[in-house]
Amino acid sequence: MSELRDPVTDADLDAYVDDQLDVARRIEVEAFLSARPEAAARVMSDLRTRDELRVALAGSKGMARPATADA
């Protein structure tokens, strides 16, 4: 992979968590994270928090697949 076009910032990491990056920038951010375990751990924690919030806000519908809920 070539050098990063721009340094990865906290705003890039937040956009990564929010799935707001274009594909090229997402690849660059992932390369950045693969070389920095501390930053990767923080992003993974943010992803978990995001997903926990989504599940909580979705209520019981977010907990089961539709086929399971119908059963």
Image (cartoon, rainbow, N blue to C red):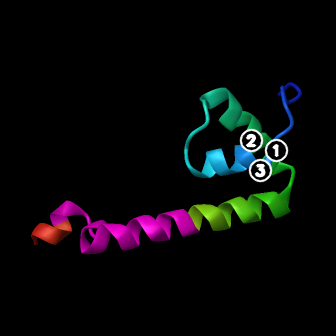
Q: Is residue 66 left or right of residue 32?
A: left
Work out whether residue 67 or residue 24 is closer to the camera in this orientation and state it.
24
- The kind of residue on which mark 3 rests is Asp
Q: Earlier in the sequence, mark 1 or mark 3?
A: 3
Picture coordinates of residue 31, whole percent (x, y) = 79, 41
Q: Is residue 19 above or below residue 68?
A: above
Q: In the orientation shown, which residue stands out farthest toward the left?
A: 71
Q: Residue at (66%, 68%) from the top-left corner?
A: 45
Chain part drawn in magenta: 49-67
Q: Residue at (19%, 62%) from the top-left corner?
A: 66
Disc 1 packing (10 Å; few <14; some 14–19; many ≥20): some
Q: Which residue is disc 3 drawn over? A: 10
For label 1, the SS is helix
- The kind of residue on which mark 1 rests is Phe
Picture coordinates of residue 34, whole percent (x, y) = 80, 49
Q: Which residue is disc 1 drawn over? A: 32
Picture coordinates of residue 12, whole percent (x, y) = 72, 43
Please tell me in which quadrant of the rendered image residue 47 appears.
bottom right
Does the magenta stretch mainly form a helix, a strand or a loop? helix
